[in-house]
Structure formats: structure tokens, C-alpha cells
Amino acid sequence: MLSLQNRKDILFLSILAAILLIVLPMGLDAFRLNLIGKYLTYAFVTIGLVACWGDSGILSLGQGIFFGLGGYCMAMFLKLQASTLEATKNQSTPGIPDFMDWNQITALPWFWKPFHSLSFSLIAMMVIPAVLAVVIGAAMFKRRVGGTYFAIITQAIASVLTILIVGQQGYIGGVNGITDLRTLDGWDIRTDHAKYILYYAGVVLLLACLLLLRFVRKSKLGRILRAMRDQEDRVRFSGYNVANFKIFIFALAAAMAGIGGALFTLEVGFMSPTFVGIVPSIEMVIYCAVGGRNSLVGAVYGTLLVNWARTSFSESFPEIWTFAMGGLFIAIVLFLPGGLASLYQNYIDPYVCRILKGNGRQTSHTVDKAI
Amino acid sequence: MLSGYSFNDLASIFVMQSFAGLILFSVFLLMALGLAIVFGQMGVINMAHGEFMILGAYTTYVCSYIFAQWMPALFGLYFFIAVILSFIVAGAVGMFLEWSLIRFLYKRPLDTLLATWGVSLILQQIFRSTFGAREVGVTLPDWMMGSWNLSETIQIPINGMIVIAITLLITIVIYGLLYKSGWGKQVRAVMQNRTMAGDVGINTERVDRFTFGLGCGVAGVAGAAFTMIGSTSPTAGQQYIVDTFLVVAFGGTESLGGTIASAFSISQARSILEFFLSGSMAQVLVLLTVIGILMLRPQGLFALKVRR
């Protein structure tokens, strides 16, 4: 017999899976479904933020860095695929990406060369963000820097990366980003059919990441992270190396953001610095805050809701949308710090417990929410 | 990168770029002073600080418009009126923000960061709806347009000197306020121990409100100075906020002298490098250096010795 908590987790995950895998594909046309797919790539970042910010108290305002790095790794591979000798024969140097040719670069820079290989690109999109996260984390957490300082430094790094990408027009595509991506290892990613497959691949990967994070949160590691968030010194005095746990969870979130970025590139067909900088990084924190910083499925719903609202509002009233976005943010922080998930926790959860168990009174205050 | 310039050329470039750096330094310093007061003294991260700067810049713009339209005789003096008005407008909005939002969040510093980001979004949209999305610039009165020819190759613009003078004045006033006045003593007492300060009869809520208002008002003055070096657009403040945070963190949050030194070194390094490298690479190089130093010395260059 499974415990109540496990049964609830299974229920929530199945509901989310049913919505994403069955309800949405049946109810939406290919264009709208691709939009949902794009939003779901942000959800990879927000569930990472749940683990980092909600569980461990590390607020990173630079998740766009990792999203962007993952996206650029994928975009570089796709761009090299699109820049065959055949396709670029009108350039002064055939065989290199078009923006390099426009910027009078005549040979492929060294850091582009490994991206000819699909397997290298796939590994790089996770490993490069994770390694950078370990470097940042080691530098900061080992010196016991956290809280607001960490937020500012990650934000500054996001800013630096954007300026760097925008400034290096010839090497990495500048402000336009890497555009005109066509095929993944010979498979055309622009058809409607491909969009469906990419959507399903994205959902399955997201569910896998959710399960992995659930495993982490359920484990002893997850309990240490929460203890660290609430009483860091006590955990340190109990003999745990606090910094290493922080570095681990930060790197895990970074790797997931990298996967999200790579999927984003595949679904949207380009990558540009507008998805790297400060504004997208903070917006991802908003999605997470709206959904609930302590709830993995909440963060996914938050991401979908905010983005859906943005798309439908900004189509008709772009001005009101910015006000609404700002107001929503203030309201959530002031009145609902737990996000939508806390609404559920207060009003619906007791009923769910009663249905699943019979008497929900004693168990509705479970502290170890895993999902 | 130095080849092709004679020694005289280099000296002139160095002086002119340093002076350009001094104007950037003025804007940085005014922004950072405001932020250091709010962040260092109160522990509040105000992401809308850049928008308060832009509020000051738009106030200056409106002021110049009104003077040009109705009081052309006094146009030469509008800038000084604009500086004062910018301070009052930004300060008043800041105090309103503290009263309506910030005071509920003192115990949750990370959440202030998020809430003030929402505020900055709203302010940006208000600017956009009122003044349009296009950049606006102010016309300078004739006497501020000229420059002072130090030698054949070195020219110092007059408006720059005025900006620097105003910055110096404000820095001295703030130093006096914080370290030489009774009110400053109250501010520092509240910062060091809120409960004890309340116990000895300091109205901590009032101190908080005025401190926040002062920080925002100084940002407004930074905006007035900003109109001298750039044109104002609704999102211009966002580009400055990260640099300003780094200036404050680099200097050490509790130290006014540290803020001045770090604003000076960052703006000078950037301005001089900008001549030899492209603008974006200079910025990247300076920011990376600052981040690197902060990773080695997280408490900033001039930190107070505080037992944590």
C-alpha cells in the first residue's frame, strides 16, 4: 500500500501528463500546440528554480544564462547543419554560417568545430551550463555568499553574457541570434509533423525531469536542502558541507535549464540573446513565483498560465499587459508568497486527502510535499 | 592597441576619455549613492531604482519644455530648477512606494527584489504611455553648450563640469546628512539594530520612509544629470541598474567612501577602455573584472568589519 503522499504525487503527475499529452494536443491546432511547447521549455527552468529557490533558498536571477547556453549549443549544431557547402555556395567562403560570411570571417572559429557532432552538442547543452554553474557556485557558496548578493552577481553574469553575444556579431550571430535553422541530423524541424514530435519529446523530457526532481526532494538530500534553507548554520554545525549541496542543486537546475533551452531552439527555430539576459531570467522567476515556489507541478502550471495570458493579452491590449504583469507580480509577492499552489494547499487539498484516504484531517498538513 | 598614437595624442585621449569617464562617474555615483543608502542602510533591493532615475530624466525634460514654451527668458536657468524638481518628484514617489509596498517586505529581502521588479515594469509602462516609446532629449541652454579649450587637442565640455559640480555637492550633502546630522544618527541606529533603535524612541518607520525617499530622490538627480549624456527612453533605466548594483557591491555596501571609489574606478576603466576596444567589449571586460574580484572578496573593497 502506497502512502497518501505517494498516491497524491502519482495523481498530480498523471493529471499533468494527461493534460499535456492528451487534452492539449486534441484541443489545439498545430500552431497553438507549438506555442504550448515553447512555454513548456521555460518550465524546465522554473522547476529547476523550485529546487534552487523554493527548496534551497538560492535565488538565481541568471537562469537565462543556462537556458541560453543550452539553446546556443543546439543552435550552433543546427546552424552548421544548415550551412552545407551546397546551401552556402553563394558566399565568399562557402561552408560557414551566413552571419560569419557577412562579417568577413573566413574560417570556422575553433569553438564551433566540435558542434559538427550531434552527440557532442547533446552532451554540451547539459554539461556546459552545469560546469558554469559549478564554477559560479563554487566561487560564491564556498565563501558563504548567498541571498541577495548571489542574486545580483548572477544577474550581472547574465548581463555580461548578453552584451558579449550582442557584441560578437561575427562569431555568434550578434543581436539577431542564430536564425534560419532547418534540420536536425537530416530531419526537417519546420514541418507540422516535426512540431508534434518535438512537442511530445518535450513533454516526456519534462515529466522525466519532474520525476528526477521529485526523487531528489524525497531523498535525504532534499531534506538537507530544506533544512539548509531554514537554518543554514545548524546544518553546517551538524557536520554537513553546505556549499557542496548548494553547488549540486544549482548545477542540476542549470543542466535542466540547458535542456529547456535546447528544446526551445528546436521548437522555435532560432536562438537570440533576448532569451539570455536579465529580463527573461527574472520573468522565469515570475513564472515560478506565480505557480508556487515550493511546488513542482505548480511551477509548470504557473509557466503555462502566465505565458498563455501574456500571449492572449498582448495580442489585443499590449499596454494593459505590462501593467497586469507588474501588478500580478506585486500581488503574488505581497499576498500569495506560495503562489497558486498555496491556494490549492489551503482550499482543495483537504478534499483530495479525504477522497484518497477517508479522513484528511491529520494528514493534510504534510510538510514533505514532494511534488 | 597603443601603436599609431604619438605620446601627445595619447595624453590628450587619456584626458578627454577621463573626463567623459567623469560624467559617467557622476551618473554612476548618484545612482549608486541612492542605491547604497537603500540597499546598504536598509537591506532593500530596489530593482525600480533605474526607473526613478528615468523619472528624474523625464522631469528634467518636462521642465525644459515648460521653460522653453512659457518662460524663454529664464531658459538658461532651467537645469537648476529641474535638478531640484527631479529630487522632489522622485523622492515623493519613492516615499509613496515605501509606504504602499516596501514596508510590508522588510523581513523578506528577496521578495522586495521581485516586487520592485513589478514596480519597475509598471513605471516603464507609465513612461511609455505618457511620453511615448521614442527617445526624447533636452535642449541645452546656449551657455552650457560650449566647451573649455584647455589646449589644442583637449576640450572639456561645460555641461559636464556642471554635472560633476552637482554630483560633488550632493555627495557632500549626503555625507553630512548621514554622518553629521541627528537624522543620520537615527538612520545608522536603525540600520545597526532596528529593535534597539525603536526602544530608545526613534520612530523607525518614519526613518525608513525618509531614507527610502532620499535614496530615490538622489536617483532622480542622477536622471537629471543623465539627460546631459544620453537621451531618455522608458527602458533606459534598466541598462544602468546592473552596473549600479555592481558599483555598490564592489565598494562594500555599508561604506560611502567605498561607493565613491568603486564608481570612480569602474566608470574610468570603462571610459578609457572604450576608446581602444569596442564599447561592448570594454563593458564586458570591466564587468567581468568586477565580478571576478567580488567572487574573491564578496564583502566588497571597503567593507566594515562586521561579525556575521
Image (cartoon, coloured by chain):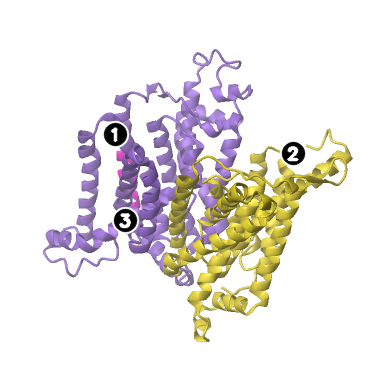
Chain colours: A purple, B yellow
Query: How many neighbours does mark 1 have within 10 angstroms: few (below 14), some (14-19), or many (20 or more)?
Result: some
- Asked whether residue B249 is in view, the answer is no
Among all residues in the image, which is located at the extreme bottom? Answer: B200
Residue A204 in the image, given as x and y percentages of width and height: 30, 39
Q: Amino acid at mark 2?
A: Phe
Q: Amino acid at mark 3?
A: Ser
Q: Quadrant of the N terminus of chain A?
A: bottom left
Q: Chain of mark 2?
A: B
* Residue in the image at 56% along x and 25% along y: A99
Per the image, is A29 magenta? no
Q: Distance of mark 2 from mark 1, alpha carbons?
A: 49 Å
Q: Which residue is mark 1?
A: A32
Overall secondary structure of the magenta section:
helix
- Asked whether residue B153 is in view, the answer is yes
Both marks 1 and 3 on one chain: yes
Q: Quadrant of the C terminus of chain A?
A: bottom left
Camera-nearest label, 1 or 3: 1
The relative height of residue A43 versus residue A262 in the rendered view (above or below) is: below
Left or right relative to B180: residue B126: left
The relative height of residue B276 versus residue A323 in the rendered view (above or below) is: above
Q: Which residue is mark 3?
A: A295
Q: Chain of mark 1?
A: A
Q: Which residue is mark 2?
A: B276
Query: How many neighbours does mark 2 have within 10 angstroms: few (below 14), some (14-19), or many (20 or more)?
Result: few
The one of A140 and A224 positioned closer to us in this rendering: A140
* Residue in the image at 45% along x and 56% along y: B119
Q: Where are the magenta residues, as a range?
A: A201-213
